[in-house]
Amino acid sequence: MLKLSVIVPFYNVRPYVPDALRSLRANAREDFEFILVDDRSTDGTADLLARAERELPGAVLIRHEENGGLATARNTGIDAARGEYLTFLDGDDWLAPGYYAKLVAAIEDLGCDFVRTDHVQCTARARSVHRVPHGRRNVVLSPRGAILPAHRTTSVDYAYAWAGIYHRRLVDRGLLHFTHGLRTAEDRPWIWKLHREADSFAVTSLLGVFYRRGVASSLTQVGDARQLDFVRAFDQVIDETAADPEAAALLPKAVRTYCAIISHHLGSIERFEAPVARKLKAMSTAALRRMPQDVLDDALASMDAERAAKLRRLRRRPVQGTEVAA
């Protein structure tokens, strides 16, 4: 068995592909494989990946016949992976030289199901270190114990799949795959599932992933209907958490996070096309009404007055069924 499988989806990120590929080359090892998933790119990305298949040590190229989105592309890579450990990289990001060897050494030393890492956020020329919101480092702990408290940022809010490494046993247990077809917020149900159901994790201060923020083609920058998949993603978080034996303790965190994300999108509603903005309001209203209402009331009471008032008004907003239809 190979030691590490690195899953790298690409979709129309041609200007950034050379940086990603150079950084993979600077991390190559004979027992590492790089699974490059071309999600039906149309901008020349595919040509660069075809060359990488020939020239990059350990490269395995998989082409999608249809564009399926990031979650589906990652699942393709997971299904093809042969490594004892798996990790992810997005096609517009890059790595420090030798980072993956250190990452593998960290999880082997700790012996846990998964390890989470800090990262460097890159916005134009600016660089800033973003740390896992978890105080204890290099100690194996229960991931379930890192979900709470509800009123603070915790490990489930740091949902970047590429900021960590994962043992193959998580694949065997059905915990590493993403929800098929989700176009945004795909990391949210995934990170919650990991923290609810995996047995052990740790956090390390290892830095090596450079996350490129503000890319024009990124869904975080595009105001179209694909952004509304956050509703499906968080509905899944709520439904699965409600079925958990400790639902009474965990649901307040899930509901409060969902409310914060709704508020975030409403706060930048001007970036959405007009029909999408209307649909955002309607779907958010329906989502608020689907939440456990007693838990929602408590969550709103714990938020700042301005955000809570906006969400309460939204919950009372009349909505027709046609407005929330997919």
Image (cartoon, grey):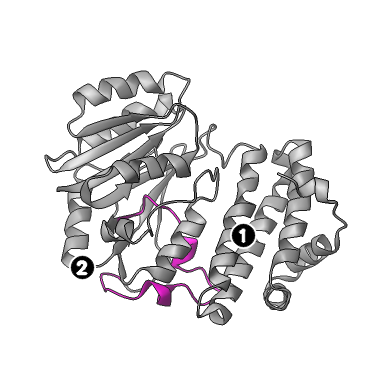
Q: Position of residue 267 (x, y in %)?
A: 71, 52
Q: Is residue 180 above or below residue 299?
A: above
Closest to the observer: 182 or 129? 182
Q: Is residue 73 visible?
A: yes
Q: Is residue 309 above or below residue 78?
A: below
Left or right, 242 with respect to 289, comes to left
Helix, strand or loop for disc 2? helix
Query: Which residue does the image show at 61% across and 51% down from the upper left?
Result: 230
Find the magenta span and give its range: 137-165
Q: Is residue 204 visible?
A: no
Query: Which residue does the image show at 85% across and 51% down from the upper left?
Result: 320
Residue under circle 1? 235
Query: Which residue does the image show at 71% across and 39% down from the upper left?
Result: 272
Residue 254 lies in what quarter of the image? bottom right
Q: Position of residue 14 (x, y in %)?
A: 42, 24
Q: Position of residue 188 (x, y in %)?
A: 51, 57
Query: Which residue does the image show at 85% across and 64% down from the upper left?
Result: 316
**Dot 1 alpha-carbon crowd within 10 angstroms: few under 14, some 14 to 19, many 20 or more:** some
**Dot 2 alpha-carbon crowd within 10 angstroms: few under 14, some 14 to 19, many 20 or more:** some
Left or right, 67 with respect to 168, comes to right
Residue under circle 2? 110
Closest to the observer: 223 or 127? 223
Specify the quadrant that holds the C terminus.
top right
Helix, strand or loop for disc 1? helix
In the image, residue 158 lies in the stretch drawn in magenta: yes
Q: Farthest residue in the left direction? A: 30
| Mark whose residue sits in front, 2 or 1 | 1
